[in-house]
Structures are given as structure tokens and as C-alpha cells.
Image (cartoon, coloured by chain):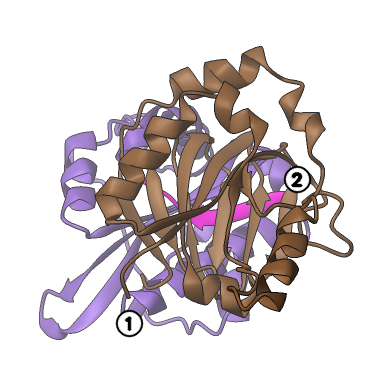
Amino acid sequence: MENFLLLSQGIDTTPLMLAIRRQPELWKEDTYLRDYPQGPFGEIESIMLRFQDRSGKAQQDALESASNGGPFYDQHESIDYPPYKTLTAARPMIMNLMAYVGGERLGRAMINKIKPGGRILPHVDSFEHAKYWDRFHIVLQSAPGVVFRCGEEKVYMGTGEVWWFQNAVDHEVINNSAEDRIHLVIDIRTSK
Amino acid sequence: MITAMVEPFTSQLDEFKGLIGAHYTELALNKDKVPLDPQWDIYDAYEKSGALVYVALRDAGELIGYVICTVAPGLHYKTCLTAIMDILFVVPSKRDSYAKGALLIIDTLEAELRRRGVQRWFMGTKLHKDIGALFRRRKFIPCEMMYTKWIGD
């Protein structure tokens, strides 16, 4: 198997799942991915923990910086979003993974939910993004029937498992189970 | 929606046990003399050794079919990695005239066997419920017929 690697099993996801259950409004607060024009995520709900600054301030600051001879805009820079403060159980999971894989920089972190019968359509992550970051999944909730395809390979990722996968290759997810499929998705820069 | 994929076997045995009874009732021979009594520990050992492939067919999470196959070098052809079907089943209520579920199982199994480098692959069918047409549709050729005779009395 070339496009998937199982890193760990038996992670206790209950504290984070409990925190999410107690703040269900978080699923509705940020629809950026779901609403992305012609994007592959039209059937998912997301909780953004870390993502690029979409306020425009980062770009403005970068423009000013560049005009003064400073650094240009860093497309890979992510910032903490409010749910990262309130879903406190996510932080140790992310930081433990950072330590485990020898991470040098933390990028995006988001919790994605696909309802039964839903799917993430086939797509390839942008070249620059996939080249810079490694993509990891911590499975918070899943059930048999979820199909994760990457290239010609398919895996079932069980609850409590941690996986790396090659997001530069065409991939899709089909939730043919009776449960919500909820993954914590994390981008980490590692030594290359 | 119906999907098929390679899944772990022993860790999901309870749901499998829910189907194999119906499978036995429909297809097994000599049921008055041979009760269904799988050697789960042997299946477990095969899986742990990497010699077992299990493809599950699901509809909204529900297990509606499966195939189990063993993968090993041939007993007298040790250079030939060989896959041999153990059992194949799709619940009757999920069968259609196109045999979509069974073909999905076969195609998924073929992809996995190819990935593992299997060279020769055997599938079988009961003659009293012949599904040989499915195999021929996937370019299998008939190669052998088995005979059975009860001598246990």
C-alpha cells in the first residue's frame, strides 16, 4: 500500500467527541469548505480549528511588508480559529501527533463530518499544498461501510486510528455506513 | 448505495455470523449431517498470517454479502501465488438481475489480489445454484469439476 499508512490505533477520541456533542452549533459556523464553488466538499460539515486567515488582514499585512522590503505573503500560514480554544481536547491530540511524526510546522486542522450516504467527491489537493504538507487523519468516529479511496487503493479507517495518506493523488470518500464519519484532519510539515 | 471493500475479518465476526446462517441454509449440502460450525480460530490464524482476504458488501453500513479467499503459494506450485475462494454470498433480497453486488465483490477482490501479486485465482460455484455465468462474464474459464459422496454413515 503506497498511498495510506496506519500510524496508530486505540486513540481515545471520546473527550473530543463529547466536546463536539456539547457544542453542535460549531458544525454550522463555518461553511467555507462546504460552499467552495464547485468544490468536492458540498456534502460535508466542518469545524475549523486552524486554517488560513480569510479576513484579508494577512494579505494586507503581507502587501505592506513586501512594499517595505519585508517577506511576502506566506500561503502556508494557518492561524487558530475560535473552536480550537473551546474544543480543548483537540490540542493534545494534534500536539501528540506533531511530536510523533517529528513535525516542524503545524498547518490546517479541521474536523470534517460526512453523513450516512454522503461523499467527498474525487479530487486532488492543490500541488503546492500537498507538496509542502503531510496530511494526517485521526478517526473520531466511523463505521464499516466508509470507503476511503486514494488512487487505486481503498481502506477502512476505524475509530481511534491515525493515518497518513497521500493527498497529492486523486482521492474520494464514500460514507456507505449508518453513522456519521467524523475525522480530525491535520496538515503537518515534516522534514523532507 | 452498495459498496464493497477489503475489510478486517475476525474483528467484525459478530455481523458476519449474522449472515452465514442464511448462507448455510440456502446453499450447504448434507445439512442433516453436517452442521454449520466454522473453525473461527483457523480463520483468525489465517488472517494473522496474511493469508486471508475478506471483502464485505454493504448497503448503508449493513453487511449484505461477502467473499472470503485464501492467498498462498500453491501446495505443489510454490512459485505460483494462488488465491482460492472459500465462500461467496449475497443476501437474496439484495440480488438483482444484473448481479451488481456479486460482480462488485468479484471486481473488488480482483483488485486486491492483483495488488498482492496473486498469479492464479480460483473461484467456485455450487452446481445446484450455479453462478458460473458471473465468473465467465469476468473472463474466468471453467477448469475443474468436484464430485462429492457421503461416506460418513
In the displayed structure image, the side of residue A63 where residue B9 appears, left or right: left
Q: Which mark is residue B112?
A: none
Answer whether residue B122 is visible to the viewer in this image.
no
Evaluate whether label 1 is on the same chain as label 2. no
Residue at horizontal 47 percent and vertical 49 percent from the top: A137
Amino acid, disc 2 = Gly
Q: Going 22% across and 60% down the picture, which residue do you hit?
A: B51
Q: What kind of element bears circle 1?
A: strand
Q: Specify the colour of chain B.
A: purple
Image location (x, y in percent) of residue B28: 43, 42
Position of residue A121 relative to residue A128, above or below, is: above
**Which chain is in brown here?**
A
- Asked if A52 appears above or below B31 in the picture, the reply is below
Tell me if B147 is positioned left or right of A88 in this view.
left
Mark 2: secondary structure: loop
The residue located at (79%, 39%) in the rendering is A30
Which stretch appears magenta?
A: B1-9
Alpha carbon distance from label 1 to label 2: 37 Å
**Residue B9 percent across, percent down from the top left:** 35, 43
